[in-house]
Amino acid sequence: MMPVPHLAALATAVPPYILDQGTVVARLRGMFPGSSRLDRLLPVFANSGIDKRHTAVPLDWFDRPHNWPERNRAYIAGALDLLETVTRRLLDRADASLEEIGAVVVVSTTGIATPSLDALLIERMRLSRTVQRLPIFGLGCAGGAIGLGRAAALAASIPDRTVLFLVVELCTLAFRRHDDGKSDIVASALFGDGAAGALLRCGGTGPAILASGEHTWPNSLDVMGWDVAEDGLKAVFSRDIPALVADGLGPAARDFLARQRLGLGDIDRFVCHPGGPKVVAACERALGLRAESLSDARGVLREFGNMSAASVMFVLERVLAADSDWRRALVTALGPGFTAGFALLSRG
């Protein structure tokens, strides 16, 4: 039998600067005075289900234009700080040492780093020179679920070592102050910055990661992603995403579970990425859940916004901290591709 990886610890972190929705709306009005298009789009802030978010840069950073190199330098600096914070929290919670880490998996889609963030973290924290590296780019919001599966597979291949799984997204750095188009304004209402991570070991008492998988829909490449503009990354997402989730997530989840000889009724807890209030509601419908039942996902959205791949790990942290009365949990998130990622967890 293949060794089974377990979650030895889980941790999250956010940068120090806070964005509340009222402040962001006031700034946008000042940037786009007299814009009728902005006036039509501003209700998205009130309807977002978000009270506040965090950003890696001071608020006045957004008052000035920034080119792609400036944005990316801010991304690398902010991402590394958050990754180090999460790593130290994980080691403390698991009573582990840097020497135990045999592999580092880092998921991020909101900036570019070559050498990649895992290499920069190894150098900063003086990890072992024989650590295996797996940087993962391009998964967007699905990265938390899919990356956890990749980290679990890696942990099973080196059962005598600990795998460090990290996710960091600095979505706010993509704000483009000269663009009052729908995608940019919606992004400015939803996205926040954050990082999360887990230590995975084979054996132990934490929740076991029994299986992982994904489903990519055909003819869906334009549903979600980035356009690369002259001044950085520009958000792309379709207004049809909630409908696609409501119609497609259920069959994909049932197919994944069927391969594990399970059904939706065998799952006690659903850990869903909070892409937005309509997406969370669509997840509830797709998975046959009661309306308003995904309270942990809504709580993360309200307090932190949509942090892309990091968000589902924030939800998982809440589920693990608040509730031990479950046997199986399904982690799921959706991102560019258009792809759903799944991870099946078992407790006891």
Image (cartoon, helix red, strand yellow):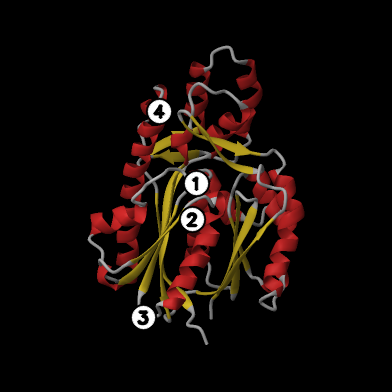
Mark 1 or 3 closer to N-term? 3
**The label number, if any, that marks residue 198 in the structure image:** none
Front disc: 4 or 2 = 4
**Residue 141 drawn above or below residue 267:** above
**Circles 1 and 3: CB atoms closer than 8 Å:** no
Callout 1 crowding tier (Cα within 10 Å): few <14, some 14–19, many ≥20: many
* Residue that label 1 marks: 307
Mark 4 or 3 closer to N-term? 4
**Circles 3 and 2: CB atoms closer than 8 Å:** no
The residue that appears at 22% across and 61% down in the rendered structure is: 126
Res 129 quadrant in image: bottom left
Label 1: state its secondary structure.
loop
Label 4: state its secondary structure.
loop
Q: For this view, does 163 lie left or right of residue 43? A: left
Q: Amino acid at mark 2?
A: Phe
* Residue that label 2 marks: 314
Front disc: 3 or 2 = 3
